Image (cartoon, grey):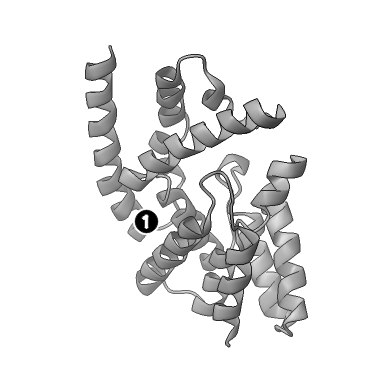
Amino acid sequence: MDIIEKTKTFVAEVLEGEPSNHDISHIERVENMCIRIQSNEGGDLKALRLAALLHDVGIVREHEQGGDHAEYSAEIAQDFLSENDIDNVLIDHVVSCIRTHRFSRGMIPESIEGQILQDADRIDALGAVGIFRSLLSMGALRGLKHASGMIKESSMNAYAQDPFEGFEEYMERKPFKIMDRLNTDTSRDIATERLKIMEAFLEQLKKEVY
């Protein structure tokens, strides 16, 4: 089994039962989007695929302990790749990409691979799948609060008394600001089409609710 397939198996096991929207399907979509963007923008495909596969592997620890899943993911990736005898230069590169991927941290990766991973992760919050993920996440976070009392401070919109208002707040705070934070032309072209879907959905939702 090559390192890509081994990594996929490892990540799928770690994220099995993951309660929010950072499950293995998200990981696979981000990996595929990275490959798509890389075909136009260039970069080291192996490093990029490894970073995509491992970028959210720390999310379970974040749910359990709080903190930052990007940092947890970087630590887990470092250990996993080291245990599999991956070259230290490649490991450092993958870990750097993972550390800078998160939207809320506002970091700008120096490498093209880091920029592509950041873009691909952000694009997965757009379009029809972005709407689906946001609603799934809101439900999961509300359920987690009810079950354990844990609150994710970076996602306070999820706990709004009126979930429609919480969803609108999320849309204005994240998806509609993503375009200005993308790194590559290829990503901006993809995001433009996906944002049209979100704008149409939100407009129709307002008509039906209000």
Q: Nearer the viewer, residue 31 or 94?
A: 31
Residue appearing at x 53%, y 27% in the figure: 158
Residue appearing at x 53%, y 24% in the figure: 157
Residue appearing at x 46%, y 66% in the figure: 31
Q: Nearer the viewer, residue 10 or 95?
A: 10
Q: Is residue 109 above or below residue 31?
A: above
Quarter of image, res 159 = top right
Q: Is residue 156 above or below residue 89?
A: above
Element marked by disc 1: helix
Residue 150 image offset from top left, x and y in percent: 70, 30
Quarter of image, res 179 = top left
Task: Classify mark 1: residues with Cα within 10 Å, few (<14), some (14-19) or many (20+).
Answer: many
Q: Looking at the picture, which amino acid does disc 1 mark? A: Ser
Q: Is residue 97 left or right of residue 121?
A: right
Residue 43 image offset from top left, x and y in percent: 48, 74
**Residue 153 in sight from this viewpoint:** no
Q: Which residue is mark 1?
A: 187
Quarter of image, res 185 = bottom left
Residue 14 image offset from top left, x and y in percent: 65, 61
**Residue 102 in sight from this viewpoint:** yes
Q: Is residue 162 above or below residue 88?
A: above
Residue 24 image offset from top left, x and y in percent: 51, 60
Residue projecting furthest to the top:
210
